[in-house]
Amino acid sequence: MKILKKALLALGLCSLSLLTFSCNDKEDELVKSERREITITEHVDSKYVQPEDLDFTYNKTGNNEYLEVCYIGPNREEINIASEYGGIKVLGYIDLNAYPPLNNVTKKLILPDTIEMIDGYMCNRFLSLEELVLPKNLKYIGPYTLRINTLKSISISSENGYYKVLDNKLYDVKNNRLIKAFNINDDEITISGCKQIGDMAFYKTNLKSIIFDEEIEEISGDSISYNDSLESITLPSTLKKFVVSYHSRRIPDDYRTYTIFNNNSNLKTIYNYSNVELDLSDKGIEVIKMNK
């Protein structure tokens, strides 16, 4: 895990996290940053995860220091992470291992309000996670962090100005983007009230039909992938483009350069009210041009 982490960090995650955290003000932008893995042995209240069950990365920019953590401990039904360890605040949860040890036990994950960023493949590890408590101060969620289909509840403080939960949907308020639809029990869903659809928004649902309503302008290519039951989607007249990813390192905003509709074996029909040109005959998908 540590080898993979270091390799990925070398590719630029360090700069991403440093730019994301509010603790790095303009006065610190030109100050050399320190980032290294450390060991912490100081124990916290017994209701929290103890240091030996976490992997720590220490960060310091100017006078600001903080920790990024990743859970590596034994499977527990509930994981509650403290806001600081060794007297240093926890500001990030980052799990960069795409193939972590699988956890089929944990049902609830509670992240401390100090955390401002969650990224990587956090939910790939927790295969049975049902309840996720997000931090009050959260400002960034990575594009594949919520790649999970077992969630029944996501909660976040109403004081958070970046994300909100409404009708079993998690939204990025600042970008007017749907991040995650969860606990879906119907065959069909109509998505409205936002302009963008993010990566993994409908990961492994049992939906047969998704109707993207008017006002939606951008749809991530990964948002509907991995849905074997999906038979049709409806695109609105307001749609302007498919994007590869909402990650900061996305490559071109053109669906033709990307394997869109991955693992949608039963997707046969797209009702297209938009002006976006789609030729998916090579995938066996019929695109029906619709008029309002």
Image: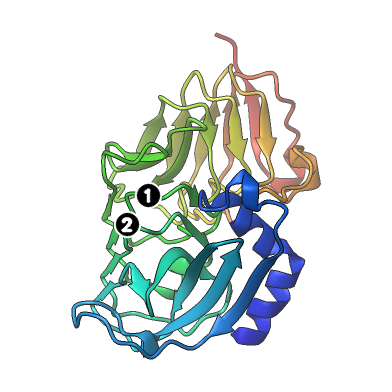
Near mark 2 (Cα within 10 A), the count class, few <14, some 14-19 or many ≥20, is some
Quadrant where the N terminus is found in the figure: bottom right
Q: Is residue 21 shown left or right of residue 79?
A: right
Res 132 → quadrant: bottom left
- The residue labelled by disc 1 is 137
* Residue at 34% from the left image edge and 41% from the top image edge: 160
Q: Is residue 262 visible?
A: no
The residue lying toward the viewer, choosing from 282 and 49, is 49
* Residue at 45% from the left image edge and 51% from the top image edge: 229
Sequence-first tag of 2 and 1:
2
Does dot 1 land on a helix, a strand or a loop? loop
Q: CA distance from mark 2 to mark 1?
A: 6 Å
- Mark 2 and mark 1 in contact? Answer it, CB < 8 Å: yes
Near mark 1 (Cα within 10 A), the count class, few <14, some 14-19 or many ≥20, is many
Quadrant where the C terminus is found in the figure: top right
Residue type for callout 1: Asn
Q: Is residue 101 shown left or right of residue 217?
A: left
**Residue 214 sits above or below residue 48 on the image:** above
* Residue at 53% from the left image edge and 85% from the top image edge: 38
Does dot 2 land on a helix, a strand or a loop? loop
Q: Is residue 139 visible?
A: yes
* Residue at 73% from the left image edge and 53% from the top image edge: 30
Query: What is the x, y in percent for residue 107?
Result: 26, 71
What is the number of the mark on residue 113? Answer: 2
